[in-house]
Image (cartoon, grey):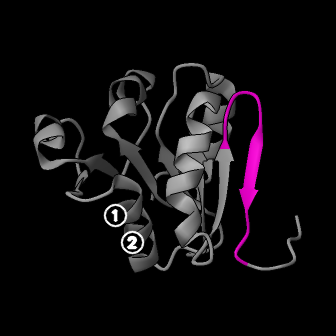
Amino acid sequence: MSSHHFVKEHQEPAIILHKLDDFPYSKLGDLLEWAPKVICLVEAIDLALIYGFKIDGIAGKSSEISAYTNRQDHLEMLAIEGPIWNGLMQKLLSLNAQGAYLITSEDDVPNLLGQIMPLADKLDLQVLTPQKRHVLSRNLSWKK
């Protein structure tokens, strides 16, 4: 568990850190405080470690993640050799995750949504950027 608080399993969504550069640190801290599972893509790992975030796993190609194996205790290496988003979604489903937050940049949203949409019926996903929140709900009705 990434937080110092106890969170019931499946109560809070997992967090995937993709691009952190422009995302306000204070908002990241609030999200990470309650996250039961934090997976960081290689693109964001250096900044996540500089911020001191407790992460549970690093996802990427085997050749990319091997340099990070000794950076934090209990760090799971998620080697994904196919399409990265397909692999990540499969990992979340194997964890019985009901939803996830994806932290990224607004510039990356169109490409990411194109990759994620085929899996959108599997779990609820909120794509958070510094500017907007994009919500993909697997149900026809969505309640906040």
Q: Is residue 63 left or right of residue 32?
A: left
Q: Secondary structure at mark 2?
A: helix
Specify the segment rendered in magenta. 128-138
- Indicate the quadrant where residue 132 lies: top right
Tell which of 101 and 35 is nearer to you: 101
In the drawing, what numbered circle is on residue 64? none
**Residue 75 appears in the figure:** yes
Q: Residue at x 20, y 35 (%)?
A: 71
Answer whether residue 134 is magenta in the image. yes
Query: The C terminus lies in which quarter of the figure?
Result: bottom right
Was residue 24 drawn as part of the magenta stretch in this picture?
no
Q: Which residue is mark 1?
A: 87
* Amino acid type for the residue under numbered disc 1: Gly
| Any part of residue 6 in sight | no
Residue 16 in the image: x percent, y percent?
49, 49
Q: Measured from the top left, where is residue 79 in percent x and y?
A: 20, 56
Instruction: Give the residue drawn at x 53%, y 59%.
Output: 116
Q: Which residue is mark 2?
A: 90
Task: Residue 76: give x, y in percent of width and height.
Answer: 24, 56
